Amino acid sequence: MNSIDYEKIGLKAGLEIHQQLDTHKLFCECPSLLRKDEPKFEVKRKLNPVVGETGEIDIAAAYEKSKNETFVYQVYDTNCLVELDEEPPHEVNKEAVKIALHISLLLNCKIFPVSQIMRKTVVNGSNTSGFQRTVLIAHDGYVETSQGKVGIDYIFLEEDSARPASRGEEDDPELEESKVYKLDRLGIPLVEIATGPHMHTPEQIKEAALKIGEILRAAKVRRGIGTIRQDVNISIKGSERVEIKGFQDPKMMIETVDKEILRQEKCVKEKTCKKEVRKSLVDGTSDFLRPMPGSARMYPETDVPLLKISRDMINEAKNTLPKLTSENKSYLKEFGLNDELITLILQNNRLNDFKSLIEYGIENANLVAKSLTLFQKEISVREKKSLNEVAEKLTADILEKVLEEVDKGNISENDVKTILIKVVRGESLHDAMKKEVVDLKGEIERLMKEKPGLSEGAYMGLVMAKFKGKVSGKEVMDELKKVLKE
């Protein structure tokens, strides 16, 4: 496949990237919370397409309607009547708009001062209303790649869809034939980034996707499987544009593009080319999903006012613009942190917590980083609790007070993890920081008398087991060496 002459075949490709934002839902105040428990109740619906602005029914919507499906929606106590389409949408989420502005500015886009919120017809079951609300935020941006600039044509802010009830949260309803959907994800704010057909090699497509991903991660977005979905549009000379959904895995991007080129070359030869949407498969090939939607699927949303973005809103977004990962790494390196700690802080989204503790005046940056990452991971494993459970117990206020006592010399660095373990187990901070009097030397001498001839490691293990977190490994080893020298 590496022998493909991309210039000769006239490869044109564009990306569409959908990223969830880390805030409450877009047109109501419901939390963006995915549920694993049983729903409160279920409702059934049939969905019907309506004519768009062109006066026609969209071809993709007509195709879905021809299946004549009945859909079941699972409703939770964290849903409201907006998600059930029984109440008009509320005012657009201002925090989501601000995050969308951050992303637009990082992608060098121009902001629209006024936009009409639109309805996009979607009758595949993934939305109770039969449409998705979307609004155009920005246009004409770019990202830099080694093969030149890639234009960002448009950035939209829109609602996420419901998710298939029988599958994982990562599944894209557009790739599924589900008849039962959970309403927990419906309405979570998304940004959609559309590049247009500005890329001409698979390598450039992959590089642009990774660059856009880095920019998104700098903003306040949700992390984890299913929070970002990516599609690619591909065409060659003599062929029609094809959209491949589920274009996620960076390791498969180049192979997927090359295999689609070969498929389109065969279609050109056989004169069977048509515009369509296809589903990406794990081996790099793709399957037909539905016809390509057109402009007939869009019509104005009349239940909410125009979105107006003032100059003050843009200036405020510029003043609070987040930094990219590369810039954050440089910032963290200034404190002498090693690569492991830097990676853990950024991966676990603890940069703001790190900055807050440093700005408060905690001097030991290395200990701050460990307390936010390594210690919490170790406590999670030891206490058999999730990282989220551990983080909920070890609030910024708790960490600040513990680390402040280290700076004052009231407790040692070696005491920090032991204190944090006690807090996670439910002790008050006051009780957890009480230094229990331990006769470490006497215990070591007693063990050596009762069990002479053991190795340092064996004695250490026995002492650690005896005191169960009341002393640190370093304290035991230091005292053990002193006793052995006597």
Image (spheres, grey):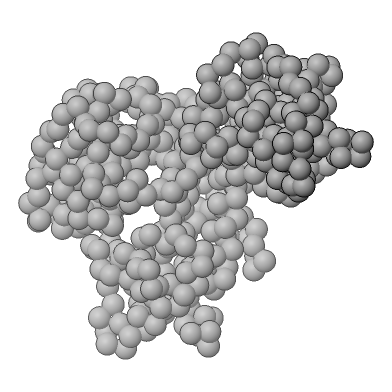
- Whether 294 is drawn above or below 88: the answer is below
- Whether 66 is drawn above or below 274: the answer is above
* Residue 448 can be seen, yes or no: yes
Between 456 and 81, the residue placed more toward the observer is 456
Which quarter of the image is occupied by the C terminus?
top right
Between 236 and 95, the residue placed more toward the observer is 95
User: Quadrant of residue 67 in the image?
Assistant: bottom left
**Residue at image point 46% right, 30% down:** 23
Between 61 and 45, the residue placed more toward the observer is 45
- Residue 287 placed where, x, y %? 28, 70
**Residue at image point 38% right, 73% down:** 283
**Residue at image point 32% right, 88% down:** 269
In the image, taking residue 183 as reference, residue 245 lies left or right, namely right
In the image, taking residue 454 as reference, residue 200 lies left or right, namely left
**Residue at image point 23% right, 44% down:** 165
- Residue 188 placed where, x, y %? 38, 35
- Whether 272 is drawn above or below 277: the answer is below
Between 304 and 84, the residue placed more toward the observer is 84
